[in-house]
Amino acid sequence: MDTNLLMQEIRQAIKNSDQSKLESLLASAPSQINATTVFGNWLHFAVSFNARMEIIKYLIEKGVDINQKAGFLKGNALNIAATERRIDVINYLLEKGAEIDISLPERNPLFSAIYSGSIDIVEVLITHKVNFKIKYTGERMKNMDALAYAKERGQIEIAEMLSLLSE
């Protein structure tokens, strides 16, 4: 099968959470497990398109790199899961040793969780020792930490929780 057609088929199987089709496609072309798209690797794609947890577990079991930095923001799957409010995926990725990338605010899953308004994910990340005091300065931020970001985004409940932790 043509590589472009195969990649389209894999994307469609992931979008439809069709695990048997995905398994069949990857069995016919095992090297495609490491393929990358504009969205990142297949794990990035699965998390972005809200694939079932079984698909995500299958991809990780088959060797997709959970820490690969790819896609538009060059972040990892943990960051995408925080943006998409996928606490099930967050917990699984952390259990599997996913890196909490805080190199840039765009890659920081805590900032993604704040942006999406998910206090549950913020709590999970705090429990896993994310550095919530790191400050960023850039185009849209000047010396801003997670507390300041939560206040700026109007995430009052998250800001209150971070404020209590900062004391």
Image (tube, rainbow, N blue to C red):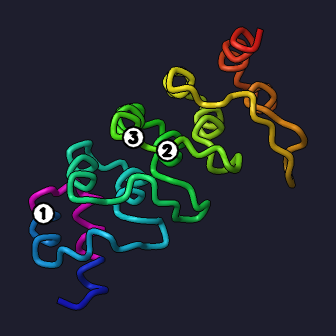
Label 3, secondary structure: give it.
loop
Q: Are dots 1 and 2 in contact, CB under 8 Å?
A: no
Amino acid beneath label 3: Gly
Q: Is residue 119 left or right of residue 87?
A: right
Q: Which residue is mark 2?
A: 99
68 relative to 11, above or below: above
- At horizontal 17% and vertical 70% (from top left) the residue drawn is 26
Q: Which residues are magenta?
A: 8-21
Spatial separation of the CA atoms under disc 3 and disc 1:
24 Å
Q: Is residue 61 left or right of residue 100?
A: left
Q: Residues within 10 Å of mark 3 (few under 14, many from 20)?
A: few
Label 1, secondary structure: give it.
helix
Amino acid beneath label 2: Glu
Percent position of residue 72, x then y: 58, 64
Label 2, secondary structure: give it.
loop
In the rendered structure, does residue 129 fall within the stretch colored magenta? no
120 relative to 145, above or below: above
In the rendered structure, does residue 14 fall within the stretch colored magenta? yes
